[in-house]
Amino acid sequence: MKSFVICGSTGSIGRQALDVISKHSESFCVKALTAYSSHELLFEQVRRFHPRIAGLVVEPETIPEDIRYSCEWFFGEDAVQRVILASNADGALISVVGFSGLTGVLTAIDCGMDVLLANKEPLVAAGEMVMEKARINQVSILPVDSEHSAIFQCLQGAAGNPLERILLTCSGGPFRTWEKEAILSATKEDALRHPKWNMGQKITIDSSTLINKALEVIEARWLFQVNPEQIEVIVHPESIIHSMIEFKDGAVLAQLGMPDMRIPIMYAMSYPARMNAVSPRIDFQTLSALHFEKPDTERFPGLLLAYEALHSGGRMTTILNGANEVAVDAFLHDRIRFGNIVQLVGDVMETVPNCTVKTIGDIFEADRMAREAANNWLKAHVL
């Protein structure tokens, strides 16, 4: 039986991961759960899954009597790290939002745990260091993002055939058919209305700007050790093909499935084994067509930022990520317009000086500088 610590258990990915575990309780168990502030839902999960350890970044006023002593509790900014350290689990599912997930990833690697990576920001900000640390500690980084899981699954069938390129699919988001001017003035409600996926607010906004796909390009570069030029983004609005790989001989392998995150979650948990489905299956008889389009970088310039950052090297991907997190938060709090998100990120990338990254401390400093520059941008561009 494999044991897991679920970091971010009250979020969309965390809840679906627990659903997978509940349906395969003979194979998986929960050692620990963490959440940021959603204590009521975490309390319910503790009652149902009986972890040995639980943690909340924001400490609640009280812990209900029935679960106060049923497990060990950790609170505070370092709760996730302390829970991972104490859990002694086989793997850690990291579904913490944003850059803050990096410390959890590093802690899990140090503990010798396989990392089931559901948030892309740790590899965007510190991909080279994370992958090298995983190699040294002989642990696996198993992708949970549907696109990266698809690539990972396809690569299992390579059988020595050299990889030519990765075809990273993209739904196109809620504004795929919108005119440029309409996109620039889109409302928060418009941007949060994703046509295919039910996700948290941050990733949904990223999907609407296509910066989410930019982050995925960077993640793919480090996960699969390919050059940026080997990663091509293709808009596929049905979200049935989750990504493809093309080999040197021209053969293409694709991974297909319903747009349901429980599929890649379960594969990461069970790898290298396969398990019975917990998700609906594709009905090919009712699937009338699959469509593919070239992404329009005139309407969605955020996608180009990934390639710019990767070609710049150094700490530029960290700067991109930090600036984007500030920009998305500002948009969600009505401080900037939708069209300002990519503008802010691009301006910060030009403002913050780039340099070589030598230590993990350099990553955290680059993130700090990016956020400071982004907040200064906001002060100078008050609505």
Image (spheres, rainbow, N blue to C red):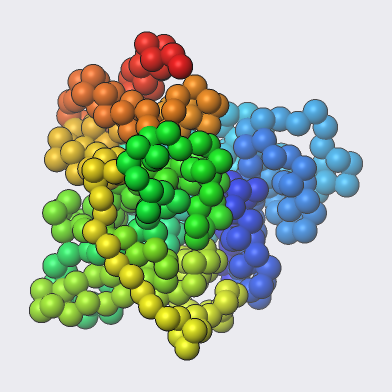
Q: Residue drawn 77% across and 46% down?
A: 43
> Vertical placement of 72 versus 18: above or below?
above
In-image side of 48 versus 146 (left or right): right
Q: Position of residue 2 (x, y in %)?
A: 56, 67
Q: Position of residue 165 (x, y in %)?
A: 17, 64
In-image side of 208 versus 74 (left or right): left
Q: Residue furthest bottom?
A: 285
Q: Residue drawn 65% across and 48% down?
A: 10
Q: Nearer the viewer, residue 62 or 383?
A: 383
Q: Residue drawn 36% across and 74% down?
A: 290
> Vertical placement of 265 versus 283: above or below?
above
Q: Residue furthest top?
A: 380
Quadrant location of the N terminus in the rendered image: bottom right
Q: Residue drawn 39% across and 63% down?
A: 237
What is the tally of numbered marks visible in this picture? 0
Q: Nearer the viewer, residue 89 or 325?
A: 325
Q: Position of residue 74 (x, y in %)?
A: 67, 36
In-image side of 300 versus 171 (left or right): left
Residue 381 visible in the current orientation: yes
Residue 372 visible in the current orientation: no
Q: Position of residue 309 (x, y in %)?
A: 21, 37
Q: Residue furthest left?
A: 249
